[in-house]
Amino acid sequence: MPKLLQVTAIHPDAQARLAASYDLLQAELGSIDAGWHAKHAAEVDGVVTGGHLGVPPALMMALPNLKVIGINGVGFD
């Protein structure tokens, strides 16, 4: 089952759909440190984030198997 790093809260219905199809790791961006990287970085296939957070370039570079970034939001400007 693909593993997703989820760094933002999402609607409960969307959360349930993700949990049914993916192995989820939940973490706040500020808590992702060297210890987290050593334990989880190689197993993350995708990141679920919000438009207000994005994914910092350093985190993208630290996830060697990153394939997709999903951004939750409606995009009002």
Image: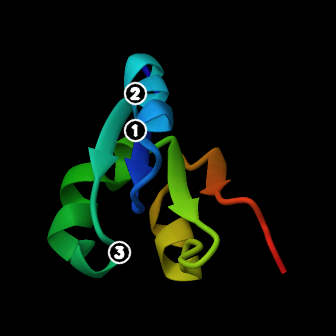
Q: Residues within 10 Å of mark 2 (few under 14, many from 20)?
A: few
Dot in front, 3 or 2: 2
Measure the alpha-carbon separation of dots 3 and 2. Answer: 21 Å
Instruction: Give the position of the C terminus as an image quadrant.
Output: bottom right
Return the residue at label 2.
16
The part of the image, by quadrant, that contains residue 71 is bottom right
Return the residue at label 3.
29
Q: Which residue lies at the image location 78% right of the left edge and 67% below the top edge?
A: 75
Given the image, on which type of amino acid does mark 3 rest?
Leu
Q: Which mark is residue 12?
A: 1
Q: Identify the element where label 3 is drawn.
A: helix
Residue contact at pointers 1 and 2, CB within 8 angstroms = yes
Residue 29 is situated, as x and y percent measured from the top left of the image, at: 35, 74
Instruction: Give the position of the N terminus as an image quadrant.
Output: top left
Q: Residues within 10 Å of mark 3 (few under 14, many from 20)?
A: some
Given the image, on which type of amino acid does mark 1 rest?
Pro
Q: Identify the element where label 1 is drawn.
A: helix
Q: In the image, 43: left or right of 38?
A: right
Q: Which residue lies at the image location 46% right of the left edge and 31% below the top edge?
A: 13
- Rendered position, 60 above or below 20: below
